[in-house]
Image (tube, rainbow, N blue to C red):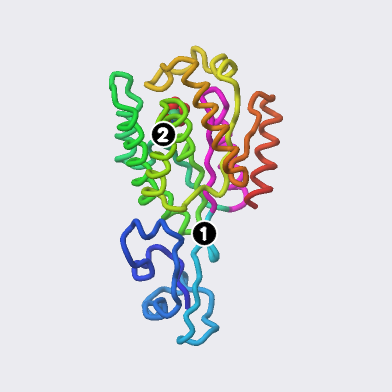
């Protein structure tokens, strides 16, 4: 019998950092704990002998999908977040909607600091706090939800750090890659939708609507660099990041997003 439920601690030996790596379960280990588990968390029936150690990854068995949405303000990301969640729920999936920075009690406190325009901080401090919040988010929310077979839809993730702290603030990409490796290893979203608008159009759409936070008070030039940061990232990972032309009408973007989610995830 094979346990794929993260509430079964014996199946996930090692530190929580270990759990962010592709999780390899050896059947011989699992058989040691299987006898004590309720039937609901046990499947499929063991077909090979106890002596033959078969590697299985959680992703092969039951892992949910991790979808992230990205874009500068005014790109329409938040509207699409709710639509994507509704679509996936209509397939009978349990969906966790979350955001970065934030998503955990500690992460939300870090978010307050990061967005507070009375704060001044070094660009590296900003990057470190973003990744600190992310580490917590992965450990407490994202990975456990995916392990339980739930879907996670996240308003921004690591691509935002490359766009804002890399592109916008000009931090070396190499440093961000080191943080990325440290915090999440090879873990990446299954699909990232990047909603692309020009800074001018984004500004027109949000003008007068939102209260201005520490990032939103930046000049247009900062957001042009952020946008370039996102586009560079999309060029680099075309198999994962889809650029959605968010200057199109809402109906067109809605339709495109639905098609993309079905194509990549269903
Ligand atoms: P945002 O997602 O725009 O929230 P809201 O729609 O409520 O304003 O705010 C988060 C801000 O944090 C946004 O300006 C981008 C920034 N950010 C980074 O600079 N780096 C990151 O890694 C993340 C996740 C966000």
Q: Secondary structure at mark 2?
A: loop
User: Magenta segment: does it hold 75?
Assistant: yes
Q: Quadrant of residue 103?
A: top left
Residue position for label 2:
172
Q: Quadrant of residue 87?
A: top right
Furthest toward the top, the residue is 208
From the viewer's perspective, is residue 132 above or below residue 203? Answer: below
Neighbor class of circle 1 (other Cα within 10 Å; few <14, some 14-19, many 20+) is many
* Residue at 40% over, 63% down: 6
* Residue at 51% over, 73% down: 43
Of tags 2 and 1, the one toward the viewer is: 2
Q: CA distance from mark 2 to mark 1?
A: 33 Å
Neighbor class of circle 2 (other Cα within 10 Å; few <14, some 14-19, many 20+) is few
From the viewer's perspective, is residue 227 above or below residue 259? Answer: above
**In the rendering, at what x and y percent does residue 73 appear?**
51, 24
Magenta-tinted stretch: 65-92
């Amino acid at each position: 019998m094979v346990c794929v439920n993260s509430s079964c601690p014996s199946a996930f030996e090692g530190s929580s950092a270990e759990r962010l790596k592709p999780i390899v379960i050896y059947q011989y280990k699992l058989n040691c704990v299987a006898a004590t588990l309720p039937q609901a968390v046990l499947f499929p029936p063991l077909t090979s002998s106890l002596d033959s150690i078969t590697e299985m990854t959680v992703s092969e068995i039951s892992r949910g999908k991790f979808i992230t949405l990205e874009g500068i303000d005014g790109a329409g990301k938040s509207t699409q977040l709710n639509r994507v969640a509704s679509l996936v729920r209509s397939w009978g999936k349990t969906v966790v909607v979350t955001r970065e920075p934030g998503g955990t009690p500690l992460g939300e406190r870090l978010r307050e600091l990061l967005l507070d325009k009375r704060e001044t901080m070094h660009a590296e401090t900003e990057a470190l706090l973003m990744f600190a919040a992310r580490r917590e988010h992965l450990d407490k929310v994202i990975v456990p939800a995916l392990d339980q077979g739930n879907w996670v839809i996240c308003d921004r993730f690591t691509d935002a750090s490359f766009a804002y702290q890399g592109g916008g603030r000009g931090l070396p990409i190499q440093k961000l890659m080191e943080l990325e490796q440290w915090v999440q290893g090879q873990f990446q979203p299954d699909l990232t939708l990047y909603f692309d608008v020009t800074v001018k159009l984004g500004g027109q759409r949000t003008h007068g609507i939102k209260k201005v936070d520490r990032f939103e008070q930046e000049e247009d030039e900062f957001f042009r660099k952020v946008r370039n940061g996102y586009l560079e990232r999309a060029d680099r990972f075309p198999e994962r990041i889809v650029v959605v032309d968010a200057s199109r009408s809402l109906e067109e973007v809605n339709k495109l997003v639905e098609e993309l989610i079905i194509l990549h995830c269903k």
